[in-house]
Image: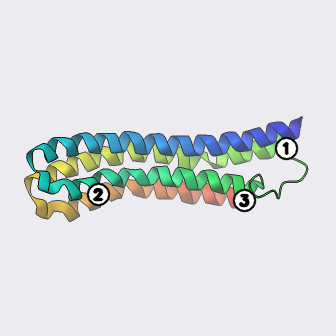
Amino acid sequence: MESFIGIALVFAGAAVTAFLGFAGSAIGMGHAGQAAAGVVGEKPNLFGKLLLMQALPGSQGIYGLVGAFLILSFSGVMGGALEGGISVATGLQYLFAGLPIGIAGLISGIYQGIVAASGISLIAKDESNMGKAIVLSVMVETWAIFGVLISFILLISI
């Protein structure tokens, strides 16, 4: 029974990691999309540039997906390398190892979307500010990348 609980904790870790990253991306892309929709109504020629700005917070969802795959792979659940189950303690380690990716993805995805929305306003005023708007938005993503790094270090330590 304990091995089934351990495996369930691994699945919970993968699910939470992915869900938090997806949620951060969806919320962030929603913020940027709202701003872009308002600008495109006035300046339809900016659609391509604004679509790029809206897509930037989507990377946190990708990090969450990668984190879920890493948890399933490292634990041996994916690929059939698992023999004898997983203890509850080990399952908890996998669950907690995914939290840095998930939480950093949630928070940075939301705030990257807010910064991207402001960058969209900057681009609407002057198209030559595109590079500056991208850099400002990508700076927030740095923390999601650090979350991936910490989770990876935790996973290789299990």
Q: Amino acid at mark 3?
A: Ser
Residue 9 seen anywhere in this rendered image of the structure: yes
Tell me the element at label 3.
Answer: helix
| Pointer 2 residue | 52
Determine the residue positioned at 84% across, 38% down.
Answer: 4
Q: Amino acid at mark 1?
A: Ser
Which quadrant is the C terminus positioned in?
A: bottom right
| Pointer 1 residue | 87
Q: Tell us which disc is closer to us: 1 or 2.
A: 2
Q: Earlier in the sequence, mark 3 or mark 2?
A: 2
Query: Picture coordinates of residue 149 (x, y %)?
Result: 56, 60
Determine the residue positioned at 14% across, 45% down.
Answer: 39
> In this rendering, would 85 be left or right of 141?
right
Q: Which mark is residue 157?
A: 3
Spatial distance from mark 1 to mark 2, Cα to Cα? 44 Å
Badge 1: how crowded within 10 Å, few (<14), some, or many (20+)? some
> In this rendering, would 120 be left or right of 7?
left
Between 14 and 40, the one lying in front of the other is 40
